[in-house]
DNA sequence: TAGGCCATCTGGTCCT
DNA sequence: AGGACCAGATGGCCTA
C-alpha cells in the first residue's frame, strides 16, 4: 500500500520507509539490470568513453544491503526536503501573515475546521514574493537615505536626532511583506476568496514566466513614488509595479 | 476532467 | 566512502 494514498499522512515525519510502487519494498520486482546506482551495483558504463577509467571493481551488495542502503538514502532525501520545507514555511510566515497552513506538516490544500481562510502560498509564489520584498526594502532604504539627506540639509545640520518622521513611524513606504499582497484593490475586496483567486492567477504572472524569470534576476530600480503610481502587475501574487529590466545578468554558473 | 502543486523515490554528480 | 544536492518520474490531492 502506498502511504501517499492515505490522506493526512503526507508531510508527517516518516520514520519508516514508504511502501509503494516505487519504494524499496518493490526492489525484488525490479527488471533485470536494475541497479540502485553505479556505486552500489557497478555495471558497465554504456557511455564510457575511451581513456576513461572503468569503475573500480566493488563488492557486490546483497539484495538486503541494497535495500538498507536505499532506505538510508531515501530517508536522508526525505529529511533534506523536510528541512527545506521548514525553511520555506518560516519564509511564508514572514511573507504571508494570513497563510492558512503555517506548517508543512499539514496537507497543502487542507481546509480544516477552525483553520484561517485562504490558501498557503506555493513555493514559487513564496520565493517570488520574498525576492520582490527584498527589492522593495532596498529601494525603501535608498529613499530613506535620500530623504534623510534632504531633512538634514533643511535643518542645517549634518548630524542630529532622528527626524520626527521616522520616530512617528509615519514612513510612507512599506510596513511589511503583506503589503506586497494587500493592495488597495485587495483591501477593498478583502476576502479569502479573492486571495485565493489572486494566488491562482500567479501562474499568469509575467514576472513568473520562464522568460521573465531570467530577466527578473537583473537589478531593478524601484522607488516609492514609482510603486505608488506605476501600473500594477495583473497577477494577484506580486501586485507590484511593472518595471523594465534593461541589463539582464546571467545566472550563476552551476 | 485538466491543471497546479506537492511529496516521495530514484539515479547521477559533486564535494568532503 | 558517504553525504549533499539536483533533476526527472510518478502518483495523490485539490480547485476551477
Image: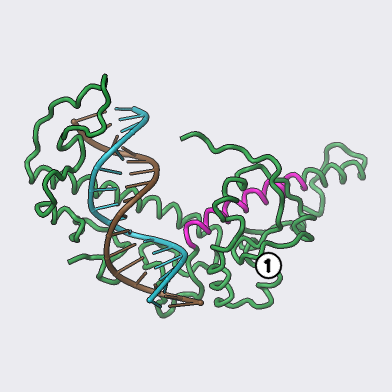
Chain colours: A green, B cyan, C brown
Quarter holding the N terminus of chain A is: bottom left
Which residue is depicted at the point 13% across and 50% down? A31
Which residue is depicted at the point 67% across and 59% down? A240
Which residue is depicted at the point 33% across and 48% down? A80
| Residue A40 as seen in the image, left or right of residue A199 | left
Q: Main structural element of the magenta stretch: helix, strand or loop?
A: helix
Which residue is at the far bottom?
A: A113
In reply to whether residue A141 is colored magenta, the answer given is yes
A50 relative to A15, above or below = above
Instruction: Kindly identify which residue carries mark 1.
Output: A183
A111 relative to A72, above or below = below
| Residue A25 as seen in the image, left or right of residue A157 | left
Residue A23 percent location from the top left of the image: 19, 55
Residue A72 percent location from the top left of the image: 20, 46
Residue A169 percent location from the top left of the image: 74, 58
Circle 1 packing at 10 Å, graded few (<14), some (14-19), many (20+), is some
A115 relative to A85, above or below = below
Which residue is depicted at the point 24% across and 49% down? A74
Q: Nearer the viewer, residue A67 or A205?
A: A205
Q: Nearer the viewer, residue A101 or A152?
A: A101
| Residue C5 as seen in the image, left or right of residue A234 | left
Secondary structure, mark 1, is: loop
Q: What stretch is highlighted in magenta?
A: A122-143
Image quadrant assignment for residue A88: bottom left
Residue C6 percent location from the top left of the image: 39, 43
In reply to whether residue A180 is colored magenta, the answer given is no
Number of numbered discs on residues: 1
Chain at tag 1:
A
Amino acid at each position: 500500500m502506498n502511504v501517499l494514498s492515505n490522506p493526512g499522512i503526507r508531510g508527517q515525519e516518516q520514520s519508516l520507509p514508504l511502501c509503494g510502487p516505487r519504494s524499496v519494498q518493490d526492489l525484488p520486482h525490479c527488471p533485470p539490470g536494475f541497479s540502485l546506482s553505479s556505486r552500489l551495483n557497478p555495471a558497465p558504463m554504456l557511455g564510457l568513453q575511451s581513456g576513461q577509467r572503468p569503475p573500480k571493481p566493488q563488492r557486490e551488495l546483497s539484495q538486503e544491503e541494497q535495500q538498507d542502503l536505499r532506505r538510508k538514502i531515501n530517508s536522508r532525501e526525505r529529511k533534506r526536503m523536510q528541512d527545506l520545507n521548514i525553511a520555506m514555511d518560516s519564509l511564508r510566515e514572514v511573507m504571508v501573515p494570513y497563510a492558512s497552513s503555517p506548517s508543512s506538516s499539514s496537507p497543502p490544500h487542507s481546509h480544516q475546521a477552525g483553520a484561517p481562510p485562504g490558501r498557503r502560498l506555493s513555493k514559487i509564489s513564496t520565493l517570488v514574493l520574498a525576492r520582490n520584498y527584498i527589492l522593495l526594502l532596498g529601494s525603501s532604504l535608498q529613499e530613506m537615505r535620500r530623504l534623510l539627506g534632504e531633512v538634514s540639509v533643511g535643518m542645517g545640520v549634518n548630524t542630529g536626532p532622528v527626524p520626527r518622521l521616522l520616530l512617528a513611524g509615519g514612513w510612507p513606504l512599506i510596513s511589511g511583506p503583506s503589503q506586497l499582497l494587500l493592495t488597495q484593490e485587495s483591501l477593498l475586496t478583502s476576502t479569502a476568496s479573492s486571495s485565493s483567486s489572486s494566488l491562482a492567477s500567479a501562474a499568469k504572472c509575467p514576472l513568473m514566466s520562464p522568460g521573465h524569470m531570467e530577466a527578473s534576476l537583473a537589478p531593478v530600480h524601484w522607488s516609492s513614488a514609482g510603486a505608488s503610481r506605476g501600473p500594477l502587475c495583473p497577477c494577484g501574487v506580486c501586485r507590484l509595479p511593472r518595471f523594465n529590466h534593461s541589463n539582464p545578468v546571467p545566472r550563476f554558473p552551476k
